[in-house]
Amino acid sequence: MIQLTQGGAYLVNGTDIVADTSEAARQIQAKTGITISREEAAKNTMAYGILREHNTSGNMDKLKIRFDKLTSHDITFVGSIQTARASGLQKFPMPYVLTNCHNSLCAVGGTINEDDHMFGLTCAKKYGGVYVPPHQAVIHQFAREMLAGGGKMILGSDSHTRYGALGTMAMGEGGPELVKQLLNQTYDINMPGVVAVYLKGAPVKGVGPQDVALAIIGAVFKNGYVKNKVMENFIDNNYNCCQAIVCAYCEELGLSEDVAFKLTEGFGSGMGGLRDTCGAVTGMFFVISLANSAGDKHLPLKSKFDTYNKFQEVAKLFKEKCGSIYCRDLKNMQKNKILSCEDCVQVADKILKKHYFK
């Protein structure tokens, strides 16, 4: 069953929903120990963080976005590039991938528009883009595998440009918006609202992600519920920050996720709610200890000090990025920016991937 709420809501600690009523501030204070305004809470969404990093206007109500990457298929890139060339294009200012639409590849074995492919290849060579030959990839599969990344923004000249499951805010627009990006102009929009999609339980056997997506579309599209809004997905799995990190590396560690989930249960909210060491940092410590320890009870010093050094290294990296390793500081409203649990987990995961699981 899909239930739509008309008022705002707060998602506390990634698990608890607090309706935006006159009692909201008191309830949030009781759960977190902090007082937060509606405006400040809105800044803790994933959408706000991504848009802030790509906005060039200095005004978060009136956005002027520069994208990280662009992508088009062979049905649209010819017109976009020709328009940009007529407007003074000298080179592609960001990675621009010229690829294929599944429809054109199906038509006469993909040879019906071979002149478009030749045009794309010559433009990629001249202006510095990426050309994907026919029959090697279709636009969105290539983008998911080669372009998407956490916190990135991609603009595509196809309505299906959506890579949110990979942490990427992607938008599909007409060719003129890509032309503006190619000419070093901006994508100008008002700050969108954010709709939280909170999934509880688990789908029955035979129901997949697309079924869930179609059911949501049926409930929110026609009535305009999501018009000019960003949808963020949350799952009622109740992982704390430490659990989120450690469980993500179970395969690399040869560890059962059930065991990892139990082992790290008490380390959320700054060590069992004490607002001490951030659970994401503790999660990094768990992962490094399990991966680095020699596990030799007869020679306990064999790897111990190396593990200690690695702890200190990741703690330093986390502090440089976030300002502190302590939950009470990361959630302190007196600071310039509150870091959400999602922010902390993403930072910790990037540190582990970059330095220990390359």
Image (spheres, grey):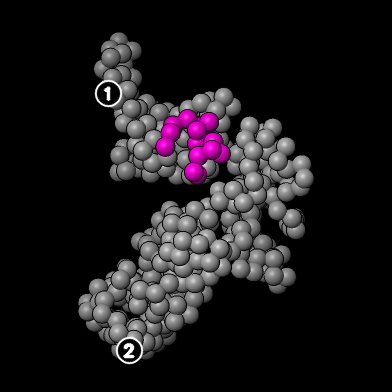
Q: Seen from this angle, which residue lies furthest left?
A: 125
Image x and y of residue 183, in percent: 35, 77
Residue 176 x/y as whole percent: 44, 82
Give 211 or 76, whichever is nearer the viewer.
76
* Amino acid identity at mark 2: Ala
From which residue to which does the magenta span run?
323-337
In the visual, does 313 lie left or right of 57?
left
Residue at x 51%, y 74% (from the top left corner): 159
Which residue is at a point 31% across and 13% down the rendered structure image?
Answer: 300
Q: Is residue 181 above or below residue 305?
A: below
Residue 300 seen by the camera: yes
Q: Which residue is mark 1?
A: 306
333 lies above or below 172: above
Residue at image mark 2: 86
Figure quadrant of the C terminus = top left
The residues tagged by marks 1 and 2 sit, at their Cα atoms, a distance apart of: 60 Å
Q: Is residue 267 magenta?
A: no
Q: Secondary structure at mark 2?
A: helix
State which quadrant residue 324 falls in: top left
Residue 341 is at least partly visible in this image: no
Toward the right, the furthest residue is: 22
The type of residue carrying mark 1 is Asp
* Left or right side of 331 for 321: left
- Of the numbered discs 1 and 2, the one sitting upstream in the chain is 2
State the residue at coordinates (41%, 66%).
67
Residue reaching furthest top? 298
At x 46%, y 61%, the residue is: 58
For label 1, the SS is helix
Percent x, y of residue 153: 43, 62
Query: Where is 220 relative to 357, above or below?
Result: below
Res 154 quadrant in image = bottom left
